[in-house]
Amino acid sequence: MVSMAAEELSRRPRTGGIYKAIACQRESTVKRLKDLSNKEPTVDVGLEMADAAHLLKLMSFSSSEIVMAGQKGHKGAMLLIQAEILRKKGHELIAECQNLLQDAL
């Protein structure tokens, strides 16, 4: 009996105001993802794409491609941050090396 009720609920049309609001948000999110797909790849772009893909998944408006794109956006943002950390550390080590050589010579 419970499964019959759940099945009936799942077939029932969603007509309340919240569903219209979700549809508008979904359209806006899809448009933003399209815009982001043409931007320069940065940490912020990667994070926003990952978050937008996750949001679409929560709205039950997603595909495996969108999920994969979101995962890649997140991973790309993480790699860019790691690269920046490594770049700074590299500069510090070279500066230390220069100081050591100046003192030694």
Image: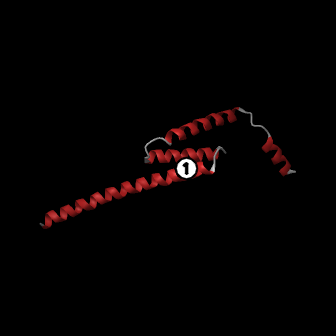
x 77%, y 37%: residue: 13
Circle 1: element type: helix
Front one among 53 and 95: 53
x 62%, y 51%: residue: 64
Front one among 3 and 32: 32
Could you say where residue 31 lies in the image, as x and y percent from the top left?
56, 37
Farthest residue, direction right = 1
Could you say where residue 17 lies in the image, as x and y percent from the top left?
70, 32
On the picture, is 52 further left or further right than 12? left
Label total for image: 1
On the picture, is 7 further left or further right than 87? right
- Which of the 4 image quadrants contains residue 93? bottom left
On the picture, is 33 further left or further right than 84? right
On the picture, is 105 further left or further right than 31? left
Farthest residue, direction bottom = 104
The C terminus, quarter of image: bottom left
x 65%, y 44%: residue: 61
Front one among 5 and 73: 73
Q: Which residue is mark 1?
A: 70
- Which of the 4 image quadrants contains residue 16? top right
x 14%, y 65%: residue: 103
Could you say where residue 85 lies in the image, as x and y percent from the top left?
36, 56
Q: How is the image coloured?
A: secondary structure
Characterize the local packing of mark 1: few (<14), some (14-19) or many (20 or more) Cα atoms within 10 angstroms: many
Q: Say what amino acid the circle numbered 1 marks.
A: Gly
Farthest residue, direction left = 105
Could you say where residue 82 lies in the image, as x and y percent from the top left?
41, 57
